Structures are given as structure tokens and as C-alpha cells.
Image (cartoon, helix red, strand yellow):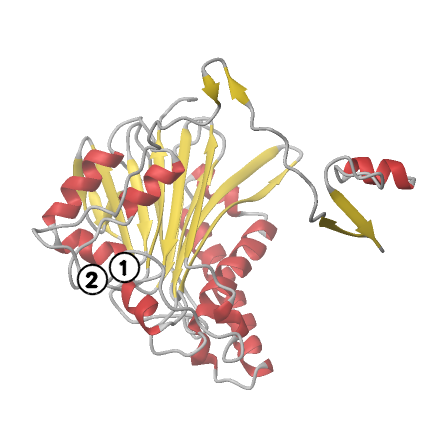
Amino acid sequence: MNESEEAARLHWTPTDPHGFVVSDGVSSVRDDYELPAPVQGADGPALTSSPVPALGAPAHSGPKAPSYPPVPQGLPAVTADLAAAVLPDIVLDGAAYPGLSVRAASVRGDSHRYAGEPRQDALCVTRVGGDEHGGELLMLAVADGVGSAPRSHVGSNEACRLAARYLDRSTSLHESIRTGDAERFQRTADDVVRQIGNLLGDLALQHGERPDAFATTLRILLVPLDPRIRTRGFLAVGDGGTALLRRGYWHLDVVTDADGDKDSDVIDTRTAALPRARSAVTRLLHAHAGDVLVLSTDGLSSPLAGDAGMRDFLAEAWNGDEVPAPADFLWQFQYRVKSYDDDRTAVVLWEHGEAQ
């Protein structure tokens, strides 16, 4: 590419028609450059006084909002912890495939914002597995760094990344879900958990830390992208929540069992955590059209269980086939409940049952 082609690509030229001057490859605005006249519409300036829609502060339970401001506050210092300093306050993600819609968010808790501490939660929405014959899975994951562990914000993000890495390499994962082979799925999940634990432990040693400094929980849902397969694979290490919204009613900490006839607990109430954990709680689940499955850290599962106002609000917002736009989902997700100030992370899956 010659100089004129490169200049055109960057939207300026050495002859400076747009008010830029170039010296040693660096562009800057000329002091004497006059801005072009504003674009005029049929009845005057293009800009109007029409208000821009705004959702405003998140809704809250009860007559009075929590005392913490519902916006990002103090930040961790780079000199103290680079990994903490570069973590965003808020993460928003999503995906759509035939029969499936996903929204995901992770928000730093009020207490961490106030103290200038990092968000210890993490999430992951990605594809794993698959070959020339198909067999891909949607991997939905949330991780909750243990609050007392000084490097848990690193551990939670690494756990999600390593889970994607090793689940993607599995040759039996999709087949065990497709065929409903719970024992095979358990073996695969345990093997992946051991590998994640080993690498997290190695990472801690490389940084001169005890393995427990990186302690984190992990919850994963694996969803075949083939809409004909209605089985989903669930695995978890440690606490968190898995809630089902079906026909407008919440089923908290339970999911539909593989036979579709009963509900079963999938919550391990022990304080298991990576990297020391060597096995996972697993379950193969059967999805029904219209189901909304919420995979979350306890920053959401605790207030959802403890506050009827939140349950009613989110049931109204997330019920049915009308999946909220990402920005609307984030606003809904931040519904505030007094005294619940932990990081909040969730991946929400809408089961349409057919291509949308």
C-alpha cells in the first residue's frame, strides 16, 4: 500500500482537506481549521429537541433504594494489582441460535465498588466441541471468586477460560449429552475439573501464592446447538444458583430432571471450590419450550430467593418468548434489594423450542 492509499484508508490525506496535519505519521487537528456547517434537515438543523429514551436508575425492592449509588465507583489501583485494575465494572454478553437465546451480565457489587475492590465474579458464553460432522455445544458459565481469597478475581476468570479450553477438547462430551449417558458425562466433568484445578494451582505457585488464593466456584451449562437435542449438561463446583422460570413461576435451586417428570436439587451446599476440588456435581437436564433457565452466582440467587419483589419483577421481565435487548436486560438484571451488595453474575437461557 502506497502513501496515498494508506492516507485514504485513515480518512485523511497529506494535503489536509479535513483539517488534519501530518508529521512523522502522527495526525493532529489544525488550530485554524473551520468546522463544516452542520447538516441541515428539511425544517432546520438535523438535531432536534426530542428526548432520548432513558431507563434511569435500576428499579428496587421496597419503598427506599439501597444507600449505595447504583453506578460504578472507586477503582483498584494498577500499582497494587494490575489484574484487578483492568477488570471492567460491568460485563454484558449474549448469543442467539435456532431455538435458543442467551443474555449474560456480571456487575461489580456495591460493597466492592465502595471499597475500590475488583469484581470477583466472571462469566463465559462461547462454543465448544464440534467437528466436520457438527456436535457443537453452547457453553454458559459463571464463576464466583471466594471473597476471602486475595486473587480470586484471577481464579474466577481463569476457571472460565480453562473450562472452555478443556471442554472444547473433549471427544465424549456431546455424545454423552446426546445419548443421556449420565455416568460418562460425570467422568468427563470430573476430568475437566481436575485439569482446571491442577492448572490453577500451578498458576498460584508461579506467582508465589498458595492455591487457595485463587479459590473460585464454577457453574456450567452445556447446550447442544442441534435444536433436535433437548438434553443439557450441567456441572458445578461450589455454591451458586440454578433457577428455572416456567410458565411464569419460579422454581428456585431446582431444574427439571432428565425424565421430565420431577424436580431435583442440583445445589451443592458445601464450600467446595477450585483449585482444590477434584469432582463436580453433575446432572443431565431436559429442556421444555418456553423454559427460562438462570445460571448464577449467589449475588443473584440469594436475593432472588429472599425477596418476592425481585422474583415478581424478573418473572415479568423474562417470561415468554420476548427476549429483552441487551441494554434492557442489563437494566432489569440490576434490580436492587437492600442488604444484598455482592457481585452479581448470571447467564440466562431462553428455550424457544424452534428457530426464532
State the CA–CA distance, disc 1 to disc 2.
Answer: 7 Å
Is residue 69 found left or right of 101 in the rendered image?
left
- Work out whether residue 96 or residue 30 is closer to the camera in this orientation and state it: 30
- Work out whether residue 345 or residue 88 is closer to the camera in this orientation and state it: 88
Residue 110 appears in the rendering: yes
- Residue 340: give its label: 2
For the N terminus, give its image quadrant.
Answer: top right
Name the N-terminal-most of marks 1 and 2. 1
**Residue farthest to the left, as pictured:** 63
* Element at label 1: helix
For the C terminus, give its image quadrant.
Answer: top left
Work out whether 200 lies above or below 52. Answer: below
Give x and y (percent) for residue 95: 47, 37
Work out whether 67 lies above or below 354. Answer: below
> Residue type at mark 1?
Gly
Residue that badge 1 annotates: 299
Q: Counting other residues with Cα less than 10 Å from the Cα at mark 1, is it few (<14), some (14-19), or many (20 or more)?
A: many
**Residue drawn at (41%, 73%), measured in percent from left and top?**
215
Give x and y (percent) for residue 299: 27, 59
**Residue drawn at (41%, 59%), measured in percent from left and top?**
89
* Element at label 2: loop
Give x and y (percent) for residue 127: 54, 43
Q: Counting other residues with Cα less than 10 Å from the Cα at mark 2, is it few (<14), some (14-19), or many (20 or more)?
A: some
**Residue drawn at (20%, 46%), measured in percent from left and top?**
59
> Residue type at mark 2?
Tyr
Q: Quadrant of residue 341?
A: bottom left
- Residue 144: give its label: none
Is residue 111 found left or right of 19 in the rendered image?
left
Task: Give the number of the mark in front: 1 or 2.
Answer: 2
Q: Are marks 1 and 2 in contact (CB under 8 Å)?
A: yes
